[in-house]
Amino acid sequence: MKPFTDYNRHYYFLRINRVLQVLIAAAVIVLITPTKSSFKYEFQQGHYWKHETLESPFDFAILKTEKEIAQEKNEIIANKTLYFDYNNTANTKMEEDLDKNISSYIDKHNLKESEKRQLLYSTDQILQTIIHRGIISDYTDMKNYDNNIIVVNNNVAQEHEIAEFYNINDVEKIVYENINKNASLSSKEKNAIADILIKVISPNIVFNSTKTDDILSTQIEDIFQTKGLILKNQKIIAQGELITPEKYQILSSLKNEYEGIHAAKGSTEKNLALIGQYLLIIIALGAMVLFIYNSDKEIFLNNKKILLIFFVILMMVGITVGVLHINQKYLYLVPLCLTPILVRTFFDIKVSLYVFLVTIIIIGFSVPNSFEFVFYQLIAGMMAILSVEHLEKRVEFFKTAVIVFATYSIIYLAMTLIQDNNFKQLDIYRFVYFAANAVMILFAFPIVFVLEKIFSLVSEMSLMEYSNTDSKLLRELSIKAPGTFQHCIQVANIAEDLIHEIGGNALLVRAGSLYHDIGKLLMPMYFIENQNMELNPHNELTNEESAQVIIDHVLNGIKLAKKNKIPEPIIDFIRTHHGTSKTKYFYNKECNEHPGTYIDESLYTYRGPKPFSRETAVLMMVDSVEAASRSMKEHSEKSISNLVDGIIDSQIKDNQLSNANITFADVDNIKQFLKKKLQSIYHVRVAYPVNNSAPKNN
């Protein structure tokens, strides 16, 4: 066997491929992330300035804090000016409605001429008085509004107090106040006039919400973002000085100005910043690939697995950049802890942690307060990985969501104590963001499903489901081919324990072992483990036909697996568990029955491919050894040892394991493990020594 020799031939091309993938992934990240010159000083409110004394390299304005801007905005909103339009059309309509209502009243009550004149004069006089003063329309906040309003009449705006006008809600009160001023009116006339006026009066000073909102928006937009000026060479902070909120805001303003100046420079400076960012991302991704190469070559050699890792990184970077474009305050809504969880469902803890670390470092180039951001995400991500170490139950993801929320919250409380020395500045919305972030971890379920379909991989959660012997296909196998089913169970148990011993994906090898002989479902009685002693259907077939039936169980297994939507990584075990070996029983039988005759070996050879991973190689060895051990007449330590050595050495000689990343040391360990396992299964005991010195009984 040449365990790595064959792979060395491909390493050159694989390495080129991985380098290209790193370069392309880095280019995509640079394209979607904002490129900026980084401020070379790292600082945090509440900590001490660890760098040398800092003087301003240029004049710059001190930015206001978000809280200060929000406070000014709230003051403007609270003291906003309301705009109203003087509506002459409403006046005309009231006068016309008054004439109609009076005419109707006169016709109905047959008034005398003097009564008509009195009614017409009084109602018109009162209406004109009310119109002249003005009837203001209702406004929701009118009762709590203490400022003057602006009334626009024929494009002329004048400031007024609200008290100058009548309120439309007080129509009845207004009418009777004006009627009672005329002492010459009788009670009957007053009631008649009141009824008419109440019907016709409407607002002639109407609230203009559009104008009010436009002016308010303009005032908010005109809020100054700065509150002071720092001159060139002015000392900003001394080494060892505490970074107070005021100093922090000045430093933040300098950082913002510095990055803005460099962003505004010519194309040469921008290109240099772009190249620098590109190189840093290449280094980060390259280090990740090298780590994978040294920790798990199986992943490095698998193009789909590497592409999955890059896809997850690009997805999380893209989501974060999208949120940053919307609003930076929503940064902690991004469920970055999904990264290690998604990777963990396909790979081990080491790989998931390293991929997550690289992801947050790359994102850290583009976010504000990068140290704080990386600290939040790293601790929360580590807790997420630890909480999903065992994926036996999906309910574990709910526990993970709670742990992530608690981790974020505790870190935020600690940061607040460090920066503000009290809890007065706590932002309740931060906890809402953390809660939403944690809830989005539950999206791991559908995302894992999509990733499985896109990359034709299978997660640990799915492997656990396929390892359940109560599945439809395995239940059918246990009924129609019970001997094969028991063989699959035995092989799965041995292979799983063996992979734990030498390293590999135990869940994958177990699932693959359970399904590797599923093709025997179609013709179960043609396989010895399902036959009784009275009937052997091969007696009715030629050796060539029998060999084809045996070989076809691999093809039939692949068809059955695809029909039942079994994932490709499990189907690989069906394809490879016999590699390109021969059906030796019928081939040898044919050779013995027809000596000296040409025999087409291809008719007795499995179509392959050969095993190409540790897991598929282990299945081939365990399957062959376990099946052969069933036909042994004697299960002694020596016979089992000879059996294991003979079968595995034959597979090595036949180059069946040449494509698998498995070493000679692994093979020796596998042999020893299988010998001990079979001895345990067949209860091989050590022979007890005979005591020749004991006295004989007469």
Image (cartoon, rainbow, N blue to C red):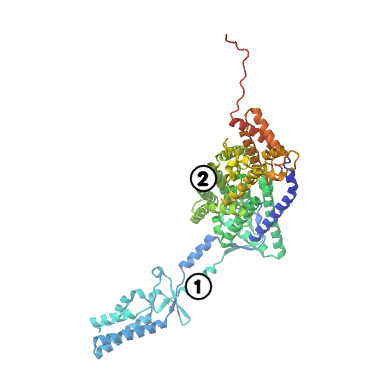
Q: Quadrant of residue 591?
A: top right
* Above or below 670: residue 251: below
Along the line of sight, which residue is nearer the eye, 13 or 676?
Answer: 676
Q: Is residue 322 left or right of residue 1?
A: left
Q: Is residue 577 visible?
A: no
Total numbered labels placed on residues in the image: 2
For the residue carrying disc 1, how many other residues have a C-alpha within 10 Å: few (<14), some (14-19), or many (20+)? few
Q: Position of residue 175 (x, y in %)?
A: 31, 79
Q: Position of residue 360 (x, y in %)?
A: 61, 52
* Above or below 197: residue 75: above
The quadrant of the rendering that contains the C terminus is top right
Q: Position of residue 274 (x, y in %)?
A: 69, 60
For the residue carrying disc 2, how many other residues have a C-alpha within 10 Å: few (<14), some (14-19), or many (20+)? few
At 56% across and 36% down in the image, what residue appears? 532
1 or 2: mark nearer the eye: 2
Along the line of sight, which residue is nearer the eye, 657 or 161?
Answer: 657
Residue placed under numbered mark 2 in the picture: 393
The amino acid beneath tag 2 is Lys
Residue placed under numbered mark 1 in the picture: 214
Q: Is residue 689 visible?
A: yes
Q: Position of residue 111 (x, y in %)?
A: 24, 88
